[in-house]
Image: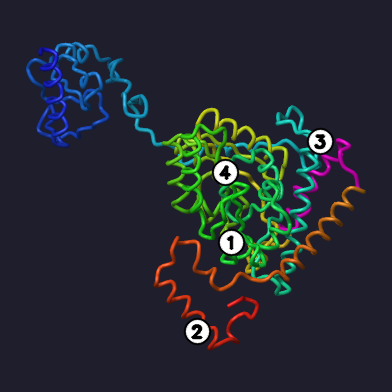
Amino acid sequence: MALWLARASSQLACRAARRLPPLLPSRHGDTAAPWFLASSAAQVPGPPEVEGGHRRGFCSGRRFAGESSSAAAVAAAEEPENGFADDDQVLDFPGGKVSFVAEMNFLPESHSERANCYRVLDDDGRTISASRFQEVSKEVAVKMYSNMVTLQIMDTIFYEAQRQGRISFYLTSNGEEAINIASAAALTIDDIVLPQYREPGVLLWRGFTLQEFANQCFGNKLDYGKGRQMPIHYGSNRLNYFTVSSPIATQLPHAVGAAYSLKMDNKDACAITYFGDGGTSEGDFHAALNFAAVMEAPVVFFCRNNGWAISTPTTEQFRSDGVVIRGQAYGIRGIRVDGNDALAVYSAVHAAREMAIAEGRPILVEALTYRVGHHSTSDDSTKYRPVDEIEHWRTARDPISRYRKWVQGNDWWSDAEESELRKRVRQELLQAIQIAERTPKPPVAELFTDVYDQIPSNLHEQEQFLRDTIMKHPADYPTDVPV
């Protein structure tokens, strides 16, 4: 009973302290003095039993635990000249202990030096002295290079197909092939991918065929999305690749939820989500990082910082040191990596995946790269970027050329193999396009399926209205869509 009374009286005293007015009379006159909660020992008129008239400005954790008034008086009497007693220099606050200081110091807006960028290969494809990276076998290395070349050729031909009017839209990954393929190679098929729209190479690595890419871009009946999505909005249940969604950064919170489900099921897998520097300007980015940190979800946030969010440069998006530094604000470990260095990307994602799963934590990866192509077929980047800047990155900083030098330097690749690969991929892709063009489109009825188990009457009415409109105005609708 005595212990309970001591704790109750201590709690009442703390509550009373919180209700004190912000300005209290000074001990030396009527002039009002500010009441600093951060002050360890503000001089105020105290009760007679408190020697020296000292009263703590903030109830410490020890007092909440039932510290006796006599013990508090002794501690107050022994406070040093700097105003802090040993027991009052640290606040046991939710989230960890916080040290008190007597000086008022604001945190700087940025570090004096920018965060370093991890790199393995120099511009000539040679490994940097003393560099540490994840070793890759000849088989994996050659597959990585072949996929990077395939992605480059696929982008070129589909882009030309759009310019010819054969597909309605396209978006390339030119200059970002290393990010696509190297990051995918560091994952397993059980890892869940939530992409943005510039990561078709991840699907390519996992086994998505050129024919499947063509079917989606042409929106035929073999397209898994049944022609409902724009071109390049790929998806594959079989390959654990969520369907691309046009709105920016909406996939980030979804990735955290997917990662948490993997954690609850004790799966040896993680989720990875890709986004551009423009995505970090969305609220979903911040919500997702905080969500992941608090829930300790095994998710890898992979930011492709290519300097431009369509026509908006990073200098007009944020004042922080890029993206990687933002992870610290949410308690997330991060790394900045050269996005045009395939070995660096592979090593960083490989390590990030292991940490995410083994330690149950989110990891933020920022890859510095450059979008060599236009944002999409609806964009002309020469209107807002210098042409010589684009050409510099296209030639001197090309990730495919750099990685080829390393592979070829290991005697794993030859000029003859290069020529054969490019010829074969081009032929396969052109054939896939021809097949995709000849394949019929999904029927109109598919517009109304896959939402409800039993289609409601209002959707039946809409379908009938659409059919009647098509019959009435046939010239306004494509003739290759079965009615």
From the viewer's perspective, is 233 left or right of 160?
Answer: left
Between 187 and 30, the residue placed more toward the observer is 187
From the viewer's perspective, is 61 left or right of 391?
Answer: left
Tell us which disc is closer to us: 1 or 3.
Answer: 1
Q: Which mark is residue 192?
A: 4
The residue positioned 89% from the left and 37% from the top of the image is 411
Say which amino acid is labelled 3. Lys
Say which amino acid is labelled 4. Ile
Tell me the quadrant of the picture where the C terminus can be found. bottom right
First along the sequence among labels 2 and 3: 3
Tell us which disc is closer to us: 2 or 3.
Answer: 2
The 10 Å Cα crowd at callout 2, few under 14, some 14 to 19, many 20 or more, is few
* Percent of width and height locating residue 93: 31, 27
Residue behind mark 1: 225
Tell us which disc is closer to us: 2 or 1.
Answer: 2
Magenta-highlighted stretch: main secondary structure? helix
Q: CA distance from mark 4 to mark 3?
A: 26 Å
* Percent of width and height locating residue 203: 66, 50
First along the sequence among labels 1 and 4: 4
Q: Secondary structure at mark 4?
A: strand
Between 427 and 24, the residue placed more toward the observer is 427
Between 165 and 450, the residue placed more toward the observer is 450
Say which amino acid is labelled 2. Asp
Magenta segment, which residues?
Answer: 389-415
The 10 Å Cα crowd at callout 1, few under 14, some 14 to 19, many 20 or more, is some
First along the sequence among labels 4 and 3: 3
Q: Quadrant of residue 99?
A: top left
Residue behind mark 2: 468
Residue behind mark 3: 138
Q: Quadrant of residue 25?
A: top left
